[in-house]
Amino acid sequence: MDAYATALLYAIPFFMGLVFIEWLYGYFVKNQTQRPLDTISSLSSGLTNSIKDSLGLIIVLVSYPFLLQYLQVFDIGSSIWVYIIGFIAIDFASYWNHRLAHSINYFWNRHVVHHSSEEFNLPCALRQSISEIFGFYSIFLIPAALLGVPHQVIAIIAPIHLFMQFWYHTKHIPKLGFLEYIIVTPSQHRVHHAINDIYLDKNLGAIFSVWDRMFGTFQEELEDVPPVYGVLSPPKTWNPIKINFQHLWRLIKDAWRTKSLSAKFLIWFKPTGWRPADVAEKYPYSKIEDVYAYDKYEKYDTPASNAFIAYCYYQLTVSTLLLMYSFFNYENMGTNQLLLAGLIIFAGIYGYTTLMDGDKSSIGIETFRGLAGLAIIVLTGSWFGIHNFLGIGNYLVAFYFLSSILGAFYFMFVEKRDFSKGAQQRA
């Protein structure tokens, strides 16, 4: 995971820079596609995913080296072709893995966070899952294993393939002519994120659009059907950790409540959105009926003064810097320290995004993790050796934890944001 942490050390500021450029462009052309709290929620989701992935917090059911060992039939050597074939194989695997997530109830839970933003912009590309507990992606790489693509090649190509899916999450790029027949474009991916009936579960490809055309899931963006973004049962929270597990919690409750023994088992493997009839009747879920009315009047929003928005960006920035320090100091910290640092950063993200929702539980969360952070500095003499790289590092980190405790109290009880209106109507 050290190599992946190093890659993230460079990728995070690069992606953040592109997000800022998109914001600037939207500001100058007077077509802003980013809302502050939504953007902060999206970027915070990216941080939680980076923590999970860099620590390898997943149980791998079948690894690619295992498949390669027992399934390899051909040896394609070490020419440039092995990288080309490996890239195509990963893209093919990505299509079917993505299609599975859109087709089966249980697997939708690990993907729903990516669709949870009611905006479509570069930040929403970073809404990535932390709820994937079991790793089975390698199953879709059986063609690569049969062809003998070395696991080292897959390890190199996989993060590149993932990072290449960032750029097309934007409204600012129109259709791209002949490229629409070759690669996934912003226009095609706008369709994928839309909840209009005609667009649902379409355009599942990652890099090449040929798979959607080949397997019947392609849909062109139509001029007379503007995409409306999000999910049909909106999460109604800025907290990316809650969003990650909302669908799973609904499945658990439905499986518990239904009187049908078969439904208790089948609910996990039924198509996305399927519910036992007895539970659906007794415990109905709210669902968007008119996507255009919802897009105009009912998108999730919470009161936020300029001072509160600045505070949330402060929280996001420091959380990012603390995470990047962990990546920078990855080899020196060791597993236990990395887990502890990751847990506190994780708790911070949970705390300030809960504060964004106006939930008073954020006070306890921010107080606990602030005191925990201060305790680490006092008891060990440093925030994981930061003083070795920055003389005043301990003081800066201590100030951050103290300001987090005070900030939570201030914005909950002193500023007194008005949540009485619920979703904010916007023209």
Image (tube, rainbow, N blue to C red):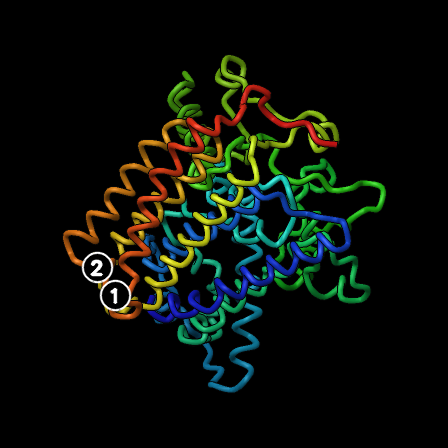
Residue 65 in the image, given as x and y percentages of width and height: 36, 69
Q: Which residue is mark 1?
A: 387
- The residue nearer to you, when weighing 195 against 204, is 195
Residue 49 in the image, given as x and y percentages of width and height: 42, 52
* Disc 2 residue type (three-letter): Ser
Packing grade of label 1 (10 A; few <14, some 14-19, many >=20) is some
Residue at the image point whose x is 34% and y is 68% from the top: 328
User: Is residue 40 positioned above or below 197 on the image?
Assistant: below
Residue 255 in the image, given as x and y percentages of width and height: 41, 25
Q: Residue furthest top?
A: 282
Asked if disc 2 and disc 1 are in contact, CB closer than 8 Å, the reply is yes
What is the CA distance from the residue labelled 2 to the residue labelled 1? 7 Å
Residue at the image point whose x is 23% and y is 64% from the top: 385
Residue at the image point whose x is 36% and y is 29% from the top: 361
On-image quarter of the N terminus: bottom left
- The residue nearer to you, when weighing 145 against 33, is 33
* Disc 1 residue type (three-letter): His
- Horizontal side, residue 345 vs residue 160: left or right: left
Q: Which residue is mark 2?
A: 382
Local secondary structure at mark 2? loop
User: Is residue 222 positioned above or below 324 on the image?
Assistant: above
Would you identify the image quadrant in which residue 94 lies?
bottom right
Would you identify the image quadrant in which residue 71 lies?
bottom left
